Amino acid sequence: KPCPPVTTSPNFDLSGFTSKRWYAHQQAPTQYVPVERNYCVYAEYEILEKKTFPWRYEVSVNNHAENKEGEQFGGPLCAFVDDPNDQAKLKVAPCFLPKNLAGECKLACGISHSCKLTVTKLKMALDHAMHSAHVRPNNRFIGAFFRTILGSGLQ
């Protein structure tokens, strides 16, 4: 059974939302973030004073998770407001990828977020990253990429 659509809060205050760190109080284990990595899970958002070059992202995102030994997973991403009439609709991707490869993220009710990145976009992003960086599939960069994208609540 598919999940119900996520609706965003009217008059969402992105500045207020990005002013504090957001901790996960409940999180479903996934293939990329197993229950063993559900320690100290949080996300930090920051509205950038200057958009990034060359893709013009306007929000930085830092996702963080740990295992019980304290090993850290996650890392930085970039985001932009997808719908100027609804600041709760962001598109998120690694900062080196163009905006058209970003996945949808809806900040719902100002307290949680639900994100989706299609398999097609993920495969395209991985193919692009591997080709551009000339890395092997078992390279730590790809592992970090998977942990960052899929381990951060993106489905």
Image: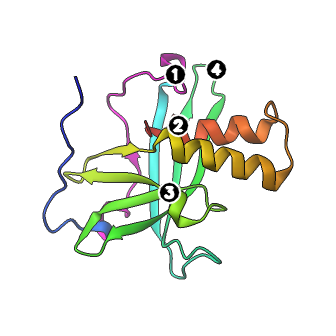
The residues bearing labels 4 and 2 have C-alpha atoms spaced at a distance of 21 Å
User: Are the residues at dot 1 and dot 2 in contact (C-beta closer than 8 Å)?
Assistant: yes
The answer to whether 33 is drawn above or below residue 115 in the figure is above
Displayed quadrant of residue 18: bottom left
What's under tag 2, amino acid-wise? Leu
Q: Earlier in the sequence, mark 1 or mark 4?
A: 1
Q: Which residue is mark 2?
A: 150
Q: Position of residue 40 (x, y in %)?
A: 48, 33
Q: Is residue 15 left or right of residue 140?
A: left
Which quarter of the figure is the N terminus placed in?
A: top left
Q: Is residue 29 left or right of residue 10?
A: right
Image x and y of residue 7, in percent: 17, 50
The residues tagged by marks 1 and 4 sit, at their Cα atoms, a distance apart of 19 Å
Q: Residue at position x 19%, y 55% from top?
A: 8
- Which label sits on residue 31? 1
The amino acid type of the residue labelled 1 equals: Gln
- Magenta-drawn segment: 15-36
Of the two numbered discs 4 and 2 in the rendering, the one whose residue sits closer to the viewer: 2
Asked if the residues shown at circle 2 and circle 3 are in contact, with their CB atoms under 8 angstroms apart, the answer is no
